[in-house]
Amino acid sequence: MTALVTGAGGLVGSAATRMLLRAGYEVFGIENDMRSYFFGPEGSTATTLQRLLEDYPTLLRVHKDDIRSSDHVEAVVERAGDLELVIHTAAQPSHDWAAREPLTDFGVNAVGTLNLLEAVRKHAPEASFCHISTSKVYGDTPNRLPLEKQELRLDLPPEHPFYDGIDTSMSIDQSLHSLFGVSKAAGDLLVQEYGRYFDMNTICLRPGCVTGAAHAGVELHGFLAYLMKCAVTGREYTVYGYQGKQVRCNIEASDLVSACLAYHGDPQPGMVFNIGGGRLSQCSMLEAIDWCEEISGASVNWRYEDRARIGDHRWWISNNNPFQQAFPTWSPTYNVPAMLAEIYDENAELWQSQPS
């Protein structure tokens, strides 16, 4: 059994790589540590990738190629041989960073996805192709929902059709996306089109926030991990807009990979789903701060900036029901406190030992 994972050293990519290796796959990984370019040394994937190589020296083959190069991508896919599964996690993940270098952002998120699709179409057209997209493809459309202010959060009235989460009936048009949202939407649509036009087994999964103990949380990406890091180290955290009452659902990386594997068990062309922690695993920024303080035993040093981030969501909870109807063996297993506790347990000692 052979699989290809792009972004093999990142949060979802490393979880996918480890789970596939444990299941007996030979894994070809693409990882060139662009996260260190995006976010500096704290965002580097090098340490995570090195651990994987030490743990699986014979079954994991890593190629330090740039997915923006069609020749490089095709060479890796051709070298992998009889691919059964592709999990595409490589991305520029920050909508703030995207505005700094739009060409780089679009090159990674859109062109890189096209390069991978075309290489798989040519050399492994029967493979399951799982693309990790994002809820940001909807732009700021969720901000038009009739949200009610509560003490610590914004929320929908229980009778609203999206109370249990937003599904793909929400339009991606006529909204402010951020350049990141645009580049991810382009890749997302390409994956759907290759599935439907070329009859390839493709799926787009659109999570809200993804996290886990292996998350290299940085200021511009990975809010739960970075928030806990600030609690442990005393570093200042900035809350942008909405009085800190904005809501996100959060899915643990291994749960997202499990969804890819569920799809691989019964693949179909051109599928697309919103996916996430749903109502099981969601919180406002203020609630997350409270949980970080409770778990760490320390006060979070945070400040409030009234200006919201461009294209950001006031409220996002994914509706998992359509995916679970299609793949009934899958369900998310973590809630937010459990994820934060694991992040703390795995990282607090290291964070405390590092220079501020």
Image (cartoon, helix red, strand yellow):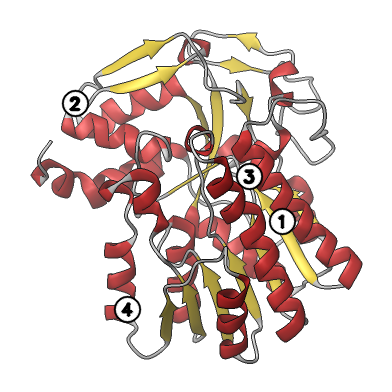
Residue designated by label 4: 53
List the residue tagged with mark 3: 134
Regarding residue 1, the answer to whether it shows in the image is no
Q: CA separation, marks 2 and 3?
A: 32 Å
Q: CA distance from mark 1 to mark 4?
A: 28 Å
Of tags 1 and 2, the one toward the viewer is 1
Question: Disc 1 residue type?
Answer: Cys
- Residue 212: where, in percent of width, then height? 40, 50
Q: Is residue 139 left or right of residue 197?
A: left
> Are the two marked residues, 1 and 2, in contact with CB atoms closer than 8 angstroms?
no
Mark 3 vs mark 4: which is more N-terminal?
Answer: 4
Label 3: few (<14), some (14–19) or many (≥20) C-alpha neighbours in 10 Å: many
C-alpha span from label 1 to label 2: 39 Å
Residue holding disc 2: 298
User: Which sits in the foreground, 104 or 155?
Assistant: 104
Task: Residue 231 in the image: state x and y as whole percent.
Answer: 24, 29
Q: Tell me the kind of residue under disc 3.
A: Thr
Give amino acid for label 4: Leu
Q: Quadrant of residue 292?
A: top left
- In percent of width and height, residue 264 lies at 69, 73
Circle 2 or circle 3, nearest the eye: 3
- Of the 4 image quadrants, the one containing the N terminus is bottom right
Looking at the rendering, in which quadrant would you find the C terminus?
Answer: top left
